[in-house]
Image (cartoon, rainbow, N blue to C red):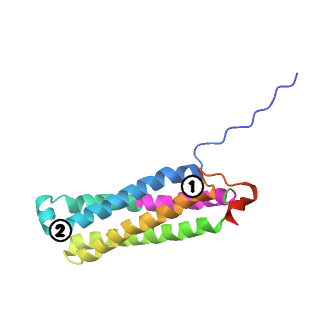
Amino acid sequence: MATPTATPIPSLWRTELLHPPVVHFTVALLAVAAGLRALALIPALERRFPFLSNAARLNLLLGVVAAWVSLWTGEGAEDVVNRLICDPTATHRHSEWAEWTTYVATAALVGELVSLRLRRWGWVAAALGISAGALVLVTGHKGAELVFQQGAGVYRPSPGCQEFE
């Protein structure tokens, strides 16, 4: 009697599986950084809670690092995901928003570091940081469309993707 050969279980360390957890950290960190930065712009709150600016900077720093890692894992996941979804251009749109979010967040971090040294232009860094927080929400929405509508995760489209015609 022949022994059946089992199909090996794929590794959990694939970029298409690493992308979602890294992205969720990115979304949380950049959104919290934007919220803290917005609160720190209110003079009464900044005087009462002087840690707001530093907390915003720390979240922004960690969020920028996570955003760059998210871009890297997203690029690795794109080829796999495009084989599963009905509209492969959806990953491209999501990727474009992710790149803009990362660039703006990185510019905000540079602005924060410059404003620490020069003690001016902090409002530019704050505006960029809040903008990055808004962009991360749009990027997240595009990612949710991939997962919940296109078949990259939760939703399984019909054969031939008839519901998209």
Question: Tag 1 or tag 2, which sits nearer the N-term?
Answer: 2
Residue 37 locus on image (x, y percent) = 26, 65
Residue 61: image quadrant is bottom left
Query: Horizontally, is 32 left or right of 120 in the view?
Result: right
* Residue on which the image places disc 1: 148
Q: How many marks?
A: 2
Residue at 68% in and 61% down: 163
- Residue 135, above or below 85: below
Type of the residue with mark 1:
Phe
* Residue on which the image places disc 2: 42
Residue 102 locus on image (x, y percent) = 44, 67
Q: Nearer the viewer, mark 2 or mark 1?
A: 1
The quadrant of the picture occupied by the N terminus is: top right
Q: Residue furthest top?
A: 1
> How far apart are the two marked residues, 2 and 1, measured between alpha carbons?
38 Å
Q: Dot 1 lies on which element?
A: helix
Label of residue 79 in the image: none
Residue at 30% in and 74% down: 127
Type of the residue with mark 2:
Ile
Chief secondary structure of the magenta span?
helix
Pointer 2 and pointer 1: residues touching (CB < 8 Å)?
A: no
Look at the image and give the residue range highlighted in magenta: 65-83
Q: Dot 2 lies on which element?
A: loop
Residue 72 seen: no
Residue 104 seen: yes
- Residue 154, above or below 63: above
Judge whether residue 40 is colored magenta.
no
Residue at 67% in and 38% down: 9
Residue 162 locus on image (x, y percent) = 72, 61
As rendered, which of 111 and 49 lies closer to the eye?
A: 49
The quadrant of the picture occupied by the C terminus is: bottom right
